[in-house]
Amino acid sequence: MRASSVVLLPHAPSSVAVARRRLSSELVDSGVYESVVDDASVIVSELISNALRHARPLPCGQVRVCWLRRGDVLELEVSDGGAMTEPRRGPSTLSSLGGRGLGIVEALSDGWGVRHEEGATTVWAVLRTPRSSGDTGRTAPAGMHAVVPDLAEFPDLLDDTDEDLCRETRNETATSRAYPA
C-alpha cells in the first residue's frame, strides 16, 4: 500500500500538530511500525518548526508538507519561501537553546538534504518504513530507525518524475544532500 499526501498549511505553529496527526494516521493505516511512525512524525515536526522559525512562507503564504511512501522507503518534504541562510545542521551545546532540529532529523533519518526551486526551498528526509506483519505488535525491533539502507537500491527515489506528488518538476532543481556519517 502507498501512503502519500501533499498538504498546504498556514505558516503558523498550529500547522506542526496538524501535519503530525495526518502523517501518523496515514502511516499507521498503511501498516507501518509505530516506532517508524514516531520517527517520521518527529522529523516532520522538526522540518516544519525550522521552516516557521527561519524562513518566509511560500508566495501563497503557506508551507507545503509532502510525504510519499514507495515500498519500504518514505520521503518527507517541507517547502517554504526560503531564508537568507542555507538550512544546515548547526553545532549545538548542552547550554544552547536551539540548533538541534536538523541533528535530530539526521539521527532519525537515513538521509536528508536541501533543494532550491524557484520561489521555494525544500528540506527533505528519507527513511525506511517496513510494514508490520499484522495488526498486533506494530513495534519495530529495537534500533530499527538506526538501520541505514543502501540508497543505491532505490535509484528512482530521487529521480522518478512519474509519481512526483510533491513538486512540479525535479529536473529543474538544484539539490544538495547530507547523509549521516
Image (cartoon, rainbow, N blue to C red):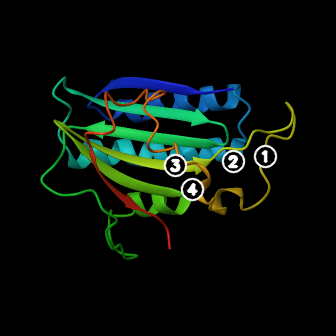
Q: What's the CA distance linking mark 2 and mark 3?
A: 15 Å
Q: Earlier in the sequence, mark 3 or mark 4?
A: 3
- Which residue is labeled 2 in the image? 35
Task: Check disc 1 and give the amino acid type.
Answer: Thr
Q: Residue at x 34, y 31 (%)?
A: 167
Image disc number at residue 151 = 4
Evaluate if marks 3 and 4 touch, with contact meaning CB atoms under 8 Å apart.
yes
Q: Earlier in the sequence, mark 1 or mark 3?
A: 3
Task: Check disc 2 and give the amino acid type.
Answer: Ser
Task: Check disc 3 and give the amino acid type.
Answer: Val
Is residue 87 positioned above or below 77 on the image?
A: below
Question: Relative to residue 7, is residue 85 drawn left or right?
Answer: left
Q: Residues within 10 Å of mark 1 (few under 14, many from 20)?
A: some
Residue 73 x, y percent position in the rendering: 61, 43
> Which marked residue is nearer to the observer: mark 2 or mark 3?
3
Secondary structure under tag 1 reads loop
- Which residue is labeled 3 in the image? 126
- Which residue is labeled 1 in the image? 139
